[in-house]
């Protein structure tokens, strides 16, 4: 498959950034549509126009903040992979913590620490869920080759 | 009914505020000395049985009974509400418990994966360190070696493929991951097998070898403790 043949890391940043923007825009769009609908004067035309205005104003903002989070996270993740030379869950947790810290930098060091803790914990939960899923999915399939002998590459 | 109750409460409280008294048992005594205007107004709103301004005592008694009835009805109404609120609180409590359970489970999984010495991730890390310090590997792949596991969707390669099996009553685990030299661009597959040591409870390495993807294929054995 071509997409796995090339090196994932630099392209992963763009991928993650775009994916996060789409998630934020669609989710924000739905949310703001309902909110704009409800906060408009009575009458379907008014409500539809209010809903559309809310979506046009707010949904890109939410998409943008999601994209910033996703892009920054992916950048730090790829940098850590490059530095450490191996791919680990530790990379994701540290990247989440650093992303949270950087994005709260305007609010001072204490807020940075709190935001870093939240980001790290969130990423740890996501990684735990991912590990659970892969382990669960891999145990669904029965054992492949018989494992009683040692591989032939080792001389006896 | 609620409006009259409300008005009754209002007048009752005003009566108490006027007299500056506290409990109901005290106030029944004091209402005998109330000004008649207040008593008549209170009597009209709450609807006492005693008609007219006969005597202070019956008026006071009925007023006292009505206020107490108002108290009882208030508690009856709030009993039904209390049941509803208790049901709602119980539902929220269950939801909170489920959330805490799920979060705790996920934390347990991630801690076991990262910190326990018998997790595949730890074994992969140790094997990678051994690969990095082996002179033959450095000779083939160069100085900086990076390791990765199976490629999942999105290109993240964190999952190391491993199989656990039991042989002769001991747990064995086989791992497979890939290494790549960033300078020479050569790729290799590392196969690791570990066996459980019953005394220490940890996993010991049984063998580590590397398949280098050159032509002809070359196998480098790093460790062999069979």
Image (tube, rainbow, N blue to C red):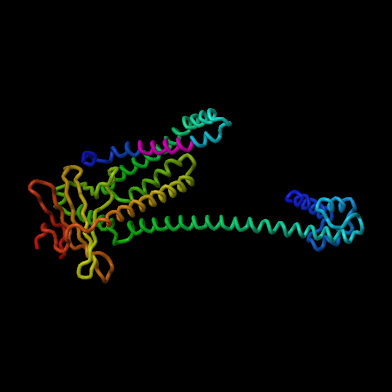
Q: Position of residue A156 (x, y in %)?
A: 9, 63
Q: Is residue A33 above or below residue A109?
A: above
Between residues B69 and B168, which one lies in front from this camera angle? Answer: B69
Count of picture labels: 0
Q: Is residue B156 left or right of residue B176?
A: right
* Location of residue A150 (image quadrant): bottom left
Between residues B63 and B205, which one lies in front from this camera angle? Answer: B63
Q: Position of residue B108 (x, y in %)?
A: 38, 59
Q: Residue at x 25, y 56 (%)?
A: A141
Instruction: Specify the principal SS of the magenta part.
Output: helix
Q: Residue at x 13, y 57 (%)?
A: B221
Between residues B206 and B13, which one lies in front from this camera angle? Answer: B13
Q: Position of residue B194 (x, y in %)?
A: 22, 62
Q: What is the residue that sits farthest to the left in this orientation?
A: B216
Is residue B45 rendered magenta in the image? Answer: no
Q: What is the residue that sits farthest to the bottom in this orientation?
A: B199
* Location of residue B204 (image quadrant): bottom left
Q: Position of residue A15 (x, y in %)?
A: 32, 38
Q: Point out the stretch of residues depicted in magenta.
A: A17-32
Q: Is residue B58 left or right of residue A44?
A: right
Between residues B84 and A64, which one lies in front from this camera angle? Answer: B84
Q: Residue at x 60, y 55 (%)?
A: B85
Q: Is residue B33 above or below residue B196?
A: above
């Amino acid at each position: 498959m071509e997409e796995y043949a090339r090196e994932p890391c630099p392209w992963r940043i763009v991928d993650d950034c775009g994916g996060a923007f789409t998630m934020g825009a669609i989710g924000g769009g739905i949310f703001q549509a309902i909110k704009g609908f409800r906060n408009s004067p009575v009458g379907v035309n008014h409500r539809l126009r209010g809903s559309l205005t809310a979506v046009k104003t707010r949904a890109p903002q939410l998409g943008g903040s999601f994209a910033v989070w996703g892009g920054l996270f992916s950048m730090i993740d790829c940098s850590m992979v490059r530095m450490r030379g191996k791919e680990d869950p530790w990379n994701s947790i540290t990247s989440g913590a650093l992303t949270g810290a950087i994005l709260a930098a305007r609010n001072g060091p204490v807020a940075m620490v709190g935001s870093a803790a939240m980001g790290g914990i969130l990423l740890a939960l996501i990684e735990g869920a991912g590990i659970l899923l892969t382990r669960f999915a891999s145990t669904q399939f029965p054992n492949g080759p018989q494992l009683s002998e040692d591989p032939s590459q080792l001389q006896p | 009914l609620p409006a009259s109750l409300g008005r009754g409460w209002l007048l009752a409280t005003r009566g108490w505020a006027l007299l500056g008294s506290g409990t109901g048992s005290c106030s029944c005594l004091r209402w005998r000395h109330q000004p008649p205007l207040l008593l008549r107004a209170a009597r009209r709103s709450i609807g006492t049985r005693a008609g007219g301004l006969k005597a202070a005592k019956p008026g006071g008694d009925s007023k006292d009974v009505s206020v107490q009835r108002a108290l009882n009805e208030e508690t009856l109404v709030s009993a039904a509400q209390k049941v509803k609120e208790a049901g709602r609180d119980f539902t929220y409590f269950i939801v909170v418990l489920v959330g805490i359970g799920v979060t705790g489970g996920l934390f347990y999984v991630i801690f076991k994966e990262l910190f326990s010495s018998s997790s595949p991730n730890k074994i992969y890390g140790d094997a990678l360190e051994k690969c990095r310090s082996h002179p033959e590997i450095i000779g083939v792949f160069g100085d900086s070696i990076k390791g990765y596991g199976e490629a999942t969707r999105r290109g993240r390669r964190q999952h190391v493929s491993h199989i656990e099996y039991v042989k002769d009553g001991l747990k064995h685990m086989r791992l497979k991951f890939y290494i790549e030299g960033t300078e020479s661009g050569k790729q290799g597959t590392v196969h690791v097998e570990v066996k459980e040591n019953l005394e220490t409870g940890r996993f010991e390495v049984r063998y580590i070898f590397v398949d280098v993807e050159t032509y002809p294929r070359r196998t480098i054995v790093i460790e062999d403790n069979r």
